[in-house]
Image: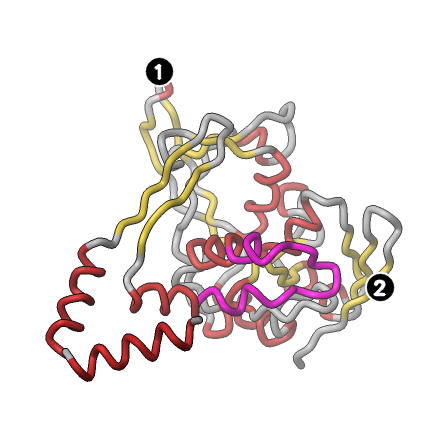
Amino acid sequence: MTAVRVAGQRIKHVVDPDGSLNDAQVQFDRRYLTLAPLLNGMTALEGLLDQEAATALADALAPSLVPAGQDDMRTAAQRRADGLTDLALNAGRDPAAGSQIRPALHVVVPLAALVGNAAPSPAALPGAPGGAGWLTPVTLSRLACDASVSRVLLGPGAVPVELGRSHRLFSPGQRQLLALRDGGCRFPGCDRPARFTDAHHLVPWQRGGHTTLANGVLLCRWHHRHVHELGWEIAPVHPNSGASGRLGLRGPHSQRLSSDPRGP
């Protein structure tokens, strides 16, 4: 069916190039994308794209449609949704080149909750569609693995009075070395490139873990959720080599896997 549609468009363009150009402009003018917040906290997406935009988006999402290992039981629609999120969260990121990571998500959280000294409570997302959204403490912990953390002092009435300098957990140079060492996501069977990974602290930074190559490992967003939300644990097989050596992974149902660096 697709081949027939494309052949018909090609014939129309040959017979009536002006009309074909006009049709393309009409399609472009009809483009739209809406984000509709739902009462349950999710957001519905609806829209139309012209052929050029649709092709560019489909090509960008194509790598996300490949299963990230044998454990990946997501549907194609779920992989496509995760791929779109990866594109948004990783815009401008290229760890292999040591580039900076552009801020993509702003989270407001008390310092005590970030370092684990407060009772679990959701964190606010002031830029969420339709107003403030919320993140669970476990999700907050995952995001804090690879993010900029800025100090915001609040005055009376919770009015911001000072914005401190951001603190980069992993420097661009460290990200470059992690990309060279790990070659992408370190979860066994996953081939997601370094561009679409987070730098995960084996010992969480909030709990005193050092920001070093020995304590850092690259994980794609899907497998990063495995560690924080789904109960997987990662630890070095040989403590002296840390993440630069073999890693042992233990799943919530006693699964046992291992991972070696792919690079030098």
Residue drawn 76% across the image and 72% down it: 260
Q: Which mark is residue 237?
A: 2
Looking at the rendered structure, the kind of residue marked 1 is Gly
Q: Which mark is residue 190?
A: none
Decide: few, some or many residues near mark 2? Use Cα within 10 Å; few <14, some 14-19, many ≥20. Answer: some
Decide: few, some or many residues near mark 1? Use Cα within 10 Å; few <14, some 14-19, many ≥20. Answer: few
Looking at the rendered structure, the kind of residue marked 2 is Val
- The residue at which mark 1 appears reads as 157
Q: Measured along the vertical axis of the image, is residue 260 above or below residue 196?
A: below
Residue drawn 64% across the image and 74% down it: 181
Q: Is residue 102 left or right of residue 52?
A: right
| Circle 2 SS class | loop
Magenta segment: 60-80
Q: Position of residue 12 (x, y in %)?
A: 22, 77
Q: Is residue 56 left or right of residue 24?
A: right
| Circle 1 SS class | helix
In front of the other: 78 or 157: 78
Q: Position of residue 67 (x, y in %)?
A: 64, 65
Instruction: Give the quarter of the figure containing the C terminus.
Output: bottom right
| Residue furthest out toward the top | 157
Instruction: Give the quarter of the figure containing the N terminus.
Output: bottom left
Q: Is residue 186 left or right of residue 64?
A: right
Residue 193 covered by magenta stretch: no
Residue drawn 17% across the image and 60% down it: 26
Q: Position of residue 175 (x, y in %)?
A: 54, 66
- Pick whichever of labels 1 and 2 is earlier in the sequence: 1
